[in-house]
Image (tube, helix red, strand yellow):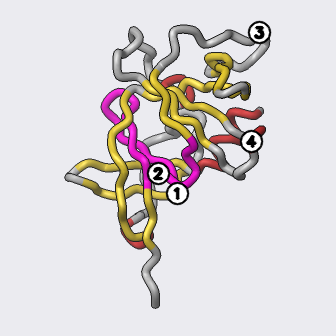
Amino acid sequence: METQNITLLSFKIQDDLFAVDALQVDHILELPPIITAVPNTPHYMKGIINLHGNIIPVADMRLIMDKEVQDKRSDASIIVLNPSNIQDARIGILVDVVEEVIETKKEALKETITEGKKGLIEHFEGTLVFNEDFVHVINIAHLCEIIEK
């Protein structure tokens, strides 16, 4: 049986480590000075940014994960995800700190055990142990469904 390698981009939301499929990441951006607010959007939507002439909606992962939003962190970043390789389907997620790229085997992912719900995310692709930390791998399709609601 052939083992499947996966490449993940890890990031922090407060003290918790999360990751997404690195192959679905288009850009990692420094936090722009202005994120244009959009009225009548869910509380976790920060607004929109202009990326090379494309409008990208930005969701605050701290709010999606039911974390307290502290002051703006100097190393906060926006990870631009492109779940379906369609220019118009891209979304940005605001994270506290982008950590690193993790290369691992698909078998390293174990079922995620969480106490209660982790905010709006009901299921993860799995959890792995990396450098003695638990890394929860977020299912990007599920995340996009939440954001697009």
Question: Which dot marks residue 53?
Answer: none
Q: Amino acid at mark 1?
A: Glu
Q: Amino acid at mark 2?
A: Val
For the point 68% across and 41% down, the residue is 144
Q: Residues within 10 Å of mark 2 (few under 14, many from 20)?
A: many
- Reading the image, the residue beneath label 1 is 125
Q: Which residues are magenta?
A: 8-26
Q: CA distance from mark 4 to mark 3?
A: 23 Å
Q: CA distance from mark 2 to mark 3?
A: 31 Å
Q: Residues within 10 Å of mark 3 (few under 14, many from 20)?
A: few
Q: Is residue 97 magenta?
A: no
Q: Quadrant of residue 108?
A: bottom left
Q: Secondary structure at mark 2?
A: strand
Q: Is residue 14 magenta?
A: yes
Relative to 99, is 8 above or below?
Answer: below
Q: Quadrant of residue 128?
A: bottom left
Question: Which dot marks residue 87?
Answer: 4
In the picture provided, is 47 more to the left or to the right than 134?
A: right
Question: Which dot marks residue 39?
Answer: 3
